[in-house]
Image: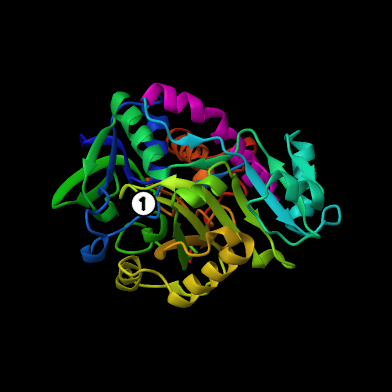
Amino acid sequence: MTVDFKVIIVGRGMMGAAAARHLSGMIEGVALIGPSEPIERKSHHGVFASHYDEARITRTFDDNMVWATLATRSLDRYRDIEAKSGISFFSEAGCLFAGPPPQPGQGYLGRALQISEALDLDVETLTPAALRDRFPQFAIDPSFNGYFEARRAGHVNPRALVRAQTRLAEQGGVTVIDATVASVCDEGAFVEVHAGGTRYTAERVLVAAGGFSNFGDLLPAPVDIRVAARTVAFFELGDREMSVFANMPSAIVFGERDEDHVYILPPVRYPDGKTYLKLGGDLETRSFKTLEDVGAWFRSDGDPAERDLLVSTALQLMPSLAGCPTSSAPCVASFTASAYPYVGYTDSPRIAVLTGGNFVAAKSSDELGRLGAVVMTQGWLGAEDFGRELTPIFR
């Protein structure tokens, strides 16, 4: 049977668009199917994506060698993607970590320092006094050290990165279809994909639908992921605040425990014309098991209690934010059973999956897309591409 495409990628987010770009340089006959961002979030009753935002932290400093390597490989390609697409998405503002002085190899910071040494990263250690002098925007615990990655770190605009990947994919011959996929079915000799009321066929399919991968009939069996709620808080900045925060880096500040951290994005201009400083964490425990529940969450403003906690924390860390208007928004994170992304085939030899950001994958999305493309063309990932660690786990 003649099929419409060699490969169909389901999901037009950060990983799916990256996979399409990489595949465009490997084979012909690729389609990327996924819906555009809804015009009005609160009245939308379809699927969503967590890249509907203007800023995500990017850095290499990490307490896990796999994640640090994935980030490094992606960062290596940022400027080339920008140059070839004509779309800027990377702001090299630097990334600051702050927390209690660690013991070697213990806790997030202790492990991250060992990995940064192994990878020969340019990470500057700041004493508490140096931390206060270098970054007066913050009122960080006076006993905390700082760890600052000035180069190849800062933040990416996820919307712009997806646009850049998609533009280059199209230039490479990928067919981009603006539709929501309703089902994916292995028919034996080919795979059938129904999207937007139209039937498409392909030799192979890569499902890169993020937190929506288990909703609907996209996979032969559900992957073992937990789709968790996250709330982010925004501070609207005026001229006074911009004079204080304009040159700040991205930051991740720990409490006495690793799990008590918050992440902070520097001032970013949003589509409404206003400039916001964004803050988030991962303390919320709510998870979603149905499409209806996750859709309702995306139509909300997040959790009010979590927003209030984030606002209170922000005011402690950055007192100059006092008096700024605040708002909040929802997000979701997909956590895998392995704590690594899933990149590999399902029980079907024609349907593979690429998902599981674990709340840290935006910075690494280009490399994860490349690995998805390798699976589509080679059939597996070797040890150099962390094939064992990234093997999907199904329920």
- Residue 343 seen in the current view: no
Foreground residue among 303 and 69: 303
Residue span colored magenta: 60-85
Foreground residue among 73 and 244: 244
Q: Position of residue 206 (x, y in %)?
A: 38, 45
Instruction: Say whether residue 337 is magenta.
Output: no
Q: Is residue 263 above or below residue 117?
A: below
Q: Is residue 40 above or below residue 90?
A: below
Is 314 positioned to the left or the right of 207 in the image? right
Q: Position of residue 204 (x, y in %)?
A: 34, 41
- Residue 224 seen in the current view: yes
Give the main secondary structure, helix, strand or loop, of the magenta stretch. helix
Q: Residue at x 16, y 51 (%)?
A: 196
Quadrant (top left, top right, bottom left, bottom right) of the N terminus? top left
Is 149 positioned to the left or the right of 223 in the image? right
Q: Position of residue 393 (x, y in %)?
A: 53, 59
Callout 1 secondary element? loop
Q: Residue furthest front?
A: 240
Q: Residues within 10 Å of mark 1 (few under 14, many from 20)?
A: some
Q: Residue at x 42, y 37 (%)?
A: 18
Q: Which residue type does callout 1 highlight?
A: Tyr
Q: Is residue 331 above or below residue 110?
A: below
Q: Residue furthest right?
A: 103
Mark 1 = which residue? 52
Foreground residue among 271 and 273: 273
Q: Residue at x 45, y 60 (%)?
A: 234
